[in-house]
Amino acid sequence: MSAGKEQKTGMAKKSKFSANPGTGISSILMIFVVLCITTFGVLSFVSARADLKLTEANVQTVQTYYSAEEEAQEVLARLDALLQRAQALPEDATELERARSIGLSGAEAQSAVQRLEKAVDAAERYRVLAAYAAASLQENAEPGDGMQADYSFALSNVSELRVTVELGAPGESFRCRVLSEQICETDAEEDRPLN
C-alpha cells in the first residue's frame, strides 16, 4: 500500500506543480484583442466626428456660395431688364425719358442726361444708358465708360464672389453676359482669387 500511496502522492505533486500554459496565454490574448477593438472603436468615433464637422462646414460654405450666386443672378436679371427697356426706347425719346426708363431719378438722371446729350449716335446713347443701368444696381457706384460692370457679393467676413459682366452693344445677340466669377479675399491688399 505504501507504493500505491506514493503513486497518489506523486500524482498529487505533479498536478500541484504543473500549470496549463494555454489558460494564461489565451487570457492575455483575449485582453489584447479587447484593447485593440476598443482602440479601433475610439479611433473610428473620433474620425467620424471630424468628418461630421468637416461636412457641416462644407454644407455651410456651399449654401453661402449658392446664396451669393442667386443674388448675382437676380442682379443680372434686373440689369437685363433695364437694358431691354433701354433698347426698346423709340429713337425720338428725350434724354430724360431714356434716363428714367432705366430707373434713374434726381441727380443721377441729370448726370445721365448730360452724358446722353453729348452722345453722337444711338450706339453711344445705349452705351451711356448701359453704364448707368449697371451702376444703378451697385451701392456707391459711378457709371463707367466701358461695356463691363463688376459686382461683389459677400460670402463671409474674408471672402466674396466677384462677377464681371459684359454689356452687349445694340444688335448683338446678348444684352449682358458673365465674363468671369471669382471667389476673392476681401481683406487682402491685392485681390487674389481663392480658387
Image: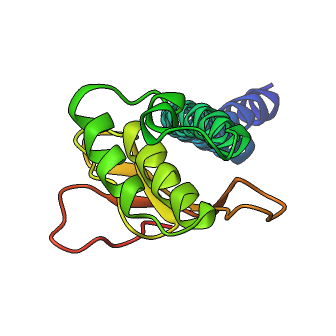
The chosen color scheme is rainbow
Residue 151, above or below 170? above
Q: Residue furthest front?
A: 92
Residue 14, above or below 127? above
Q: Quadrant of residue 190?
A: bottom left
Q: Position of residue 85 (x, y in %)?
A: 66, 35
Residue under the point 45% across and 70% down: 146
Would residue 9 be visible to someone looking at this image?
Answer: yes
Q: Name the one closer to the observer, 107 or 73.
A: 107
Residue under the point 43% across and 66% down: 194
Q: Name the one closer to the observer, 13 or 141.
A: 141
Q: Position of residue 171 (x, y in %)?
A: 80, 63
Left or right, residue 127 beside residue 12: left
Q: Position of residue 52 (x, y in %)?
A: 56, 31
Residue under the point 21% across and 34% down: 107
Please identify the quadrant where the N terminus is shown. top right
Q: Quadrant of residue 10?
A: top right
Q: Position of residue 51 (x, y in %)?
A: 57, 39
Q: Name the one closer to the observer, 83 or 68.
A: 83
Would residue 16 be visible to someone looking at this image?
Answer: no
Q: Name the one closer to the observer, 74 or 153.
A: 74
Q: Quadrant of residue 115?
A: bottom left
Q: Number of numbered discs present?
A: 0
Residue 6, above or below 92? above
Left or right, residue 65 beside residue 87: left
